Image (tube, rainbow, N blue to C red):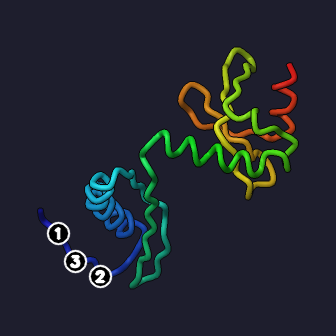
Amino acid sequence: MKTHAITKIDRAACRTISDTALKALQAVAAQHGLTVKAAGGRYEDTRYTARFAFTVNDAQVLETSAKEKWDKWCELLGLKPEDFGKTFTVKGKTYRITGLLPNRDKNSIQLDCAGQAKVCSAASIKQFLKS
């Protein structure tokens, strides 16, 4: 593999470093049943601090964690523990409640729609579940 020395940190250099590091970290993540993705970073002329996010790759563990968080916070948003996992249809599309983001003021409810992650407000969810 041919490499070249980086003498100044710029956006292109950060991308190169991040891509190379991500490839190496994917092998480490796979050994531990995790996934990894680049999560940004900061740079100056001579320094780059990269961020990478490792995530548990076990659907059951993720579901249990999301449910525990839901049970802890849902009532503060006017929802019920049993609302987790419920489905509803809007404009012909079916959505499933998959969790919540308690640090968000708006659009704090996580949804799944045909495998795509979406977010919605608690107020909208209450209306959708009534109909």
Q: Quadrant of residue 107?
A: top right
Q: Residue at x 48, y 61 (%)?
A: 39
| Callout 2 amino acid | Thr
Q: Amino acid at mark 3?
A: Ala
Disc 3 marks which residue? 5
From the image, tell me which residue sits under label 1. 3
Q: Position of residue 114 (x, y in %)?
A: 56, 25
Residue located at (46% from left, 60% from top): 53
Give the structural element (helix, strand or loop) at label 2: loop
* Above or below, 53 relative to 121: below
Within-10-Å neighbours for mark 3: few <14, some 14–19, many 20+ = few
Helix, strand or loop status at disc 3: loop
Give yes or no for contact between labels 3 and 2 (Cβ–Cβ under 8 Å). Answer: yes
User: Mark 3 near mark 1, Cβ–Cβ under 8 Å?
Assistant: yes
> x and y percent of residue 8 in the render?
35, 80
Whole-percent x and y of residue 66?
62, 45
Tell me the residue at 69%/40% (across/down): 119
- Give the Cα separation between the discs numbered 3 and 2: 6 Å
- Residue on which disc 2 sits: 7
Dot 2: within a 10 Å radius of its alpha carbon, few (fewer than 14), some, or many (20 or more) residues? Answer: few
